[in-house]
Image (cartoon, grey):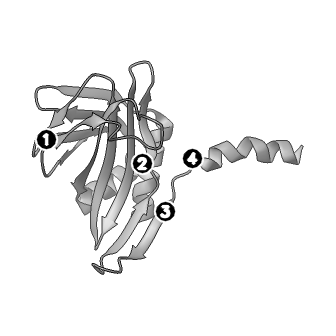
Amino acid sequence: MKKLLVLLLIPSMAGAQKIVENKIDDFTHHKIKRTSWEPLVRNFGGHTIILTRISEVDGNRFLDVRIMRDAGPFVIKENGQFMLKTETDSIITLQVLRTEFSCLGCGADGITGSGLQGMNISFPLTANDAKYLSIHLTRKIRVYFFDSYWEEEVKERPAKGLAKALQLIN
């Protein structure tokens, strides 16, 4: 019975948010801390995958995002917005620093998403926004592309994963 319980718990522990990098870079001497990539949105019917992680470089925090979609190429222009709506209906708005273009497999995590248009982008995250998002779960996201925007609901488990990642970095 104990073996069965352990086998049932292993998959849930495998997806747990954790620190995967915590070092001082040998060349730049930057202190770097990063969490693991975890899914925020997995909409296989619409072929949309969004993975996130939190990075901290010399005290500056970033929400790193991998976006993968099957809707053809897409662009996020400089100052393009990534919005997170929390359980309290508050909106946290993050802005990309430069124009980003998708390419085939560019947001992929291993083979996951390798056949989809994607991108890997980072959004600066203020200490206040990081603290707020670590306490209040994200319920919905909106990404502004060059000519449109796109929204997705965030389920409970991935929302808790994002909050946990922020707590690990704080």
Q: Residue furthest right?
A: 1
User: x and y percent of residue 22 in the render?
Assistant: 44, 71
The local secondary structure at tag 4 comes to loop
Label 2 belongs to which residue?
A: 162
Compared to residue 136, the image places residue 32 above or below, namely below
Q: Earlier in the sequence, mark 2 or mark 3?
A: 3
Q: Are marks 2 and 3 in contact (CB under 8 Å)?
A: no
Label 4 belongs to which residue?
A: 15
Left or right relative to 102: residue 70: right
Residue 36 in sight: yes
* Residue lying at 11% horizontally and 32% vertically, measured from the top left: 146
Amino acid on which the number 3 mark rests in the picture:
Val
Quadrant for the C terminus in the image: bottom left
Amino acid on which the number 4 mark rests in the picture:
Gly
User: x and y percent of residue 81 in the render?
Assistant: 16, 41
User: x and y percent of residue 63 in the render?
Assistant: 30, 52
Quadrant for the N terminus in the image: top right
Q: Earlier in the sequence, mark 3 or mark 1?
A: 3
